Image: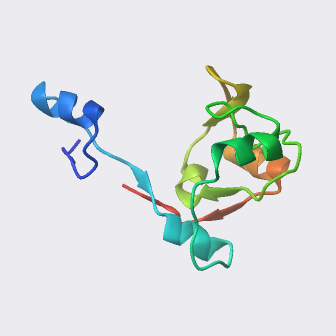
Amino acid sequence: MSRRTSVGTPATVALTKAGISFAVHTYDQKALASAVGGRKAAMADPSRAERTTGYVVGGISPLGQKEPLRTVVDETALLFETVYVSAGRRGADLSLMPGDLLAATNGTTAPIGSS
């Protein structure tokens, strides 16, 4: 595992100080925008996200939303037997097969992540 400190957060600083190897995995908002036919994407305002989905920030699930939002999953998720998503409450996750996540959300895959 390589050390990548391009994302300088207290977590990465602590790991670097401790001499612990880690990798930062980010998502590319331009790639997400492109995947849905847009020019740019941004994180939603927290209160708007809560009103739209019916969930609280930190527990927003792609499943069972009040107003279903478009779901795009990084294409590499298909390489795994299971993936994890929020269960709809802070501190609770669901594990399921990526194909089932896509089916349940009517989602699509695209190359939106980077390593």
Position of 20 with respect to 81 (left or right) is: left
Q: Position of residue 94 (x, y in %)?
A: 69, 28
Q: Residue at x 65, y 43 (%)?
A: 46
Q: Residue at x 79, y 55 (%)?
A: 69
Q: Position of residue 40 (x, y in %)?
A: 56, 73
Nearer the observer, 56 or 86: 56
Q: Is residue 26 above or below residue 32?
A: above
Query: Going by the picture, which residue comes out furthest to the right?
Result: 66
Nearer the observer, 105 or 53: 53
Q: Answer with the quarter of the image where residue 61 lies.
A: top right
Q: Is residue 74 above or below residue 59?
A: below
Q: Is residue 78 above or below residue 53?
A: below
Q: Answer with the quarter of the image where residue 64 lies.
A: top right
Q: Quadrant of the C terminus?
A: bottom left
Q: Residue at x 32, y 46 (%)?
A: 24
Query: Going by the picture, which residue comes out furthest to the top?
Result: 91
